[in-house]
Amino acid sequence: MELLLQLIVTTLQISAVYILFSLGLTLIFGVMQIVNFAHGHYFAISALITVYFMPWLVAAGFPAAGAYILSGAFGVLVAALLGLATYYFGFRYFQRDMVGSFILSVGFVLLFDGLFLELFGGAARSVPSLVEGTVSAFGVYITGQRLLLCAAAVSTAFILYLILMKTKLGLALRAVSIDQEAAMLQGIPYNKIALAGFMLAAVLAGIAGALIAPVSIVTPAIGADYIVKGFIAVIIGGLGSIPGAIVGALFVAVIEAFGGYYYGASTATVATFFLVIVFLLFRPKGLFGNG
């Protein structure tokens, strides 16, 4: 029982960042019907800036918590600006064009790969944990830093839920994702809503990147793994579905935690891709997709 509980807690730890990342991907697809492989670089730039500037701020006399908050906030801001740049200089011309947006996003990926290597170098970076020690209950252990990560991720997801369900912006985003033409006939400014959805997705990726910085080794290529896992999650859950993104991220985390423990990380990865193939063959719309 203790082992089962520990694996469940591990699943929740893994899924915390996957959920934020996948929510951004599915939000972009739901509003604009585009495939954005550059989404991983919004995540990566936020993590890189966090691990790059936090030690500098600590050396300048800031307390560790304050340095992390400031560098993380700056990372999220830069991620949002990068999202804005990719929208204005590319994706706004390829709305509801999955093939064109896919090709464009690959171009952005190659551009940002080279740019990040030039700016940050290829060395791996890390920052010390802000919360020392381990929390235990019923034989289950979790580090204080990962507990903080989970709490921040859940809080961010809940705020997103409130935005989508309780605000005019959220109502407009949901209306556009269901039927663009009908939404425009009701007076919803599609281009402004598309931009808002794209920016919100970039901010989510930036927050995920800032959260992962204290618990992971960060390199310019960190976004590559997460973009693959993010797309797997939204394929399983259903492209454009917010609940689907959450469930899909949990699916991926369960396979990684349980499969990795019992059969090894390589087997878990193979199992994840096999599951994607099964969904593409028998349920291409995903668990919560329409049709």
Image (cartoon, rainbow, N blue to C red):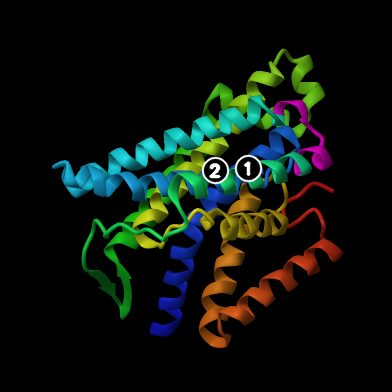
Name the dominant secondary structure of the magenta segment.
Answer: helix
Which residues are drawn in magenta?
A: 92-102
Quick one: 267 or 239, which is closer to the camera? Answer: 267
> Image point 67% across, 53% down: which residue?
234
Residue under the point 54% across and 56% down: 221
Q: Is residue 131 magenta?
A: no
Q: Name the residue under label 1.
A: 111
- Does residue 172 appear anywhere in the picture? no
- Near-viewer residue (121 or 194): 121
Q: Is residue 101 magenta?
A: yes
The answer to which image quadrant residue 70 occupies is top left
Numbered label attached to residue 78: none
Q: Where does label 2 land, which residue? A: 115
Amino acid type, mark 1: Leu
Q: Determine contact: label 1, label 2, CB under 8 Å.
A: yes
- Does dot 2 land on a helix, a strand or a loop? helix
Q: In which quarter of the image is residue 135?
A: bottom left
